[in-house]
Image: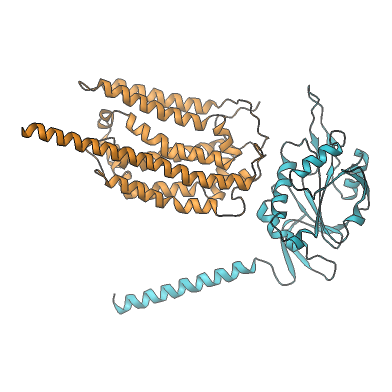
Chain colours: A orange, B cyan
Amino acid sequence: MKVQWWCAALGEAWEWTWRPYPGVWAFVALCILAYVLILRSTPAPAGEARHRGTRAAVFGAGVASLWLVLDWPIGALGAGYLASAHMVQFLVITLVAPPLLLYGVPTEAYHRLQPRVVAALRSLTQPLVAIVLSNLIWFITHVPLVADRLLASQVGSFVIDIAWLATGLQFWWPVVAPVPEWPWFRGMTRLAYLGAQLIASKPLFVYLTFTHYPRYATYELAPRVLGITARADQQAAGLLMEVGGMLILFVAAWILFLRSMLREEAADRAQAVSGR
Amino acid sequence: MSPAYRRAAVFIFAAALAAALALAARLSRGGAGVGEVSLTGVVLVDPIPKPDFTLLDTEGQPFPFKERTAGKLTLVFFGYTHCPDVCPVHMANLAAVLNDLPHEMREQIAVVFISADPERDTPERLRQWLDAFDKRFIGLRGSLEDVNAILAELRLAPVMHGEPDEKGNYVVGHPAQILAFTPDGLLRVMYPFGTRQTDWAQDLPRLLRFTGNGPLGLRAHTEGGES
């Protein structure tokens, strides 16, 4: 068996036989190790221990979601066989894992960052910069000439996945706002940001879905999996992007809305108590 | 806006419009010159006449190839049904585009699949495999000697069978290109593995124009490079 460290297009017939991807395991282990080191170096303030547990669980869910889509079988299918599996990877790496990872890191850890890093983060996470840059990278990595070239090698495939994760973190930062004193948005303006993303993702959706011929040589010339034709696969990828992306953004908007409501209610109660 | 800015804006708009029109005109020409046909396949410098042979079809009936495909654009592929990669992908992409063609155009095209593994490709298996792509695909079988003789006539490498594994499975080495015999009975273009659906969609109508009723130049990738 030919062992790859990261999932890339092989050009071989697909087999439902497990394959190891040591690079993916190393990446996941590195994420967990970094998180443990962060927790150890930033003791929880008094009364925050319970929140630490919740944050650790959320971070764990983020890492688990990454592992799920980077490793066999989804990682291998997405890298070389099915555009629809590639789209599942895209949605999870850019829209599901990043908010979980951002929320999972304790706020105190962000306070320990070097001033230069803070300055860079503040520039990169301005809402307009974040939404434009992340969508630009997402569009570029879906241009057939770029995607076909990168998916053919393990390094290229790794670059795509890391670029998606980095821009996913950038996109979500203004919404999740892990550092309360650096919020870009307050209250409902975050919902408008998510709404803008629904519009920003449209060109890519149209590009992938409303085409007669398959766009990507990687998937068109790959041995078929489960008898799915190249055209059906690409249309499924486009629909997944639209429906899946919309669903994720709606869930995020709903959570933001609920949290905002709960906060307002709590503030009202506190005001009522203090007014008595 | 000052008059100078207004003039500059009008000039830029006019220049952009002119550039867009020029680009549209260039694209609409499709890159083909007068009297030439531009193709994405590999064009043979010396076209090869259609070979005259008879093999058995999937009904077990003799199929005189030259006679039965006369006047049609004939696409021939040597492959095998146990092929894990090249054969099913090539056939699927071709079938997808043929399915899009207008009926009258589709009727002028014959697709012939010649088995490079007659031992395992029984008539039933071959028919079932081809039907998954297009029920109109013709499947032919013959002895390996017959198949290799046809390949030699077409100046292609012979079929090679690999060593069987512990389960008795083996791979078959075979030409990976689809051969396009134009309606005038000449093998003019070969389509290697990697030919995309967009390539077929562009080339098939153009290949149908080679009816033998007049010279048509070919402009494409040739055996020796660009022509």
Question: Looking at this rendering, what residue extends furthest in the left direction?
Answer: A276
Q: Where is residue A14 in the image (x, y as percent from the top left)?
A: 65, 33
Q: Position of residue B68 (x, y in %)?
A: 90, 55
Residue B39 picture quarter: bottom right
Residue drawn at x 66%, y 55% as measured from the top left: B198
Q: Position of residue A178 (x, y in %)?
A: 29, 35
Would you place residue B107 above or below residue A257 in this image? below
Q: Where is residue B134 in the image (x, y as percent from the top left)?
A: 75, 48
Q: In which quarter of the image is the C terminus of chain A?
A: top left
Near-viewer residue (A271 or A223): A271
Residue A68 visible? The answer is yes
Residue drawn at x 80%, y 39% as measured from the top left: B80
Would you place residue B61 above or below residue A72 in this image? below
Q: In which quarter of the image is the N terminus of chain A?
A: top right
Residue drawn at x 46%, y 71% as measured from the top left: B16
Residue B118 picture quarter: top right
Residue drawn at x 46%, y 73% as measured from the top left: B15
Near-viewer residue (B155 or B129): B129
Task: Give left or right: position of B193 versus A23.
Answer: right
Near-viewer residue (B119 or B184): B119
Task: Give left or right: position of A234 versus B156.
Answer: left
Residue B226 visible? The answer is no
User: How many discs appear?
Assistant: 0
Task: Give left or right: position of B73 versus A118.
Answer: right
